Amino acid sequence: MQDSGMNSEHHIEARGLNKKFGYKTALRNIDISLQEGDSLALFGPNGAGKSTLIQVLCSLLQPTSGSVRIAGYEARHDREALHQIIGLIAHQTFLYPHLTAYENLKFYGAMYGVARLDARIKDVLDLVGLRDYTNDTVQNFSRGMQQRLSIGRAIIHDPVIMFLDEPFTGLDQQGREDFIRLILQFRDQGKTVIMASHDLPLGLELCNRAAILKAGEMVYQQDVAHISKNDFRQIYARQIGEHGLPLQVV
């Protein structure tokens, strides 16, 4: 699909996004422009619209109005092609509990047409630290192990764009450190990343752009190179209010 109103140079471009659920407005006139290789940290209190925005960008939800183009694809019309190039880590793991770790990855890898799938599954299980649990069923996994496998599910097809919605949920310290290294690897590989997080310092460390959502509005966007952690804490407090500050602000 072609849309002459959007810039083809942008890897992710959203214009005038609005999303309503009945009488409730979840997103208000959101604009985003990211180049290939950019990484955007989305901050905001619970209910600000971060998850809704990610779901709209991934085409899991249709916007009430506005447009989204991802890597040249019109999200509203090119959903199948779009899903071949994106990876999503969300609150829901999208895993099948009665299947093993291997079977889950085989299902998703086959769906994406991954070449040399068995070898890829082994590599991914190594990356997420689950090689020793290859043949264990997911229903017996801890929440952290499920999150690790969900990361594997999201990267099995080597997507060029990653959407991360609170990706550290359930991970222990080792899992957290492993996944930080993986996100840095995404960045080194030139992947484009959008990450919703409550951890201000970590988001600023991992991403080159930062944005703040409040009540569905994008109230702040800036290059991370232009802000310090202390300055950003103050900016966040002004935009959200001290009562909305996350715990991870040191």
Image (tube, helix red, strand yellow):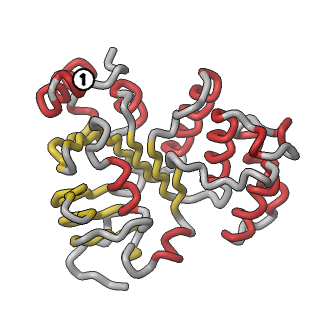
**What residue occupies the far front of the structure in this picture?**
23
Quadrant in which the N terminus appears: bottom left
Side of 106 relative to 196 (left or right) = right
Q: Nearer the viewer, residue 198 or 200?
A: 198
Tag 1 secondary structure = loop
Side of 238 relative to 83 (left or right) = left
**What residue occupies the far bottom of the structure in this picture?**
1
Name the residue beneath numbered marker 1.
228
Q: Nearer the viewer, residue 119 or 233?
A: 233
Say if residue 230 shows up in the picture. Answer: yes
**What residue occupies the far left of the structure in this picture?**
238
Say if residue 30 shows up in the picture. Answer: no
Residue ID at (50%, 48%) = 90
Residue ID at (11%, 28%) = 238
Quadrant in which the C terminus appears: top left
Residue ID at (15%, 27%) = 241
Q: Is residue 232 above or below residue 151?
A: above
- Estimate the x, y position of residue 59 in percent, counting from the top left: 42, 68
Q: Is residue 191 above or below residue 11?
A: above
Side of 171 relative to 63 (left or right) = right
Residue ID at (81%, 57%) = 103
Side of 91 relative to 94 (left or right) = left
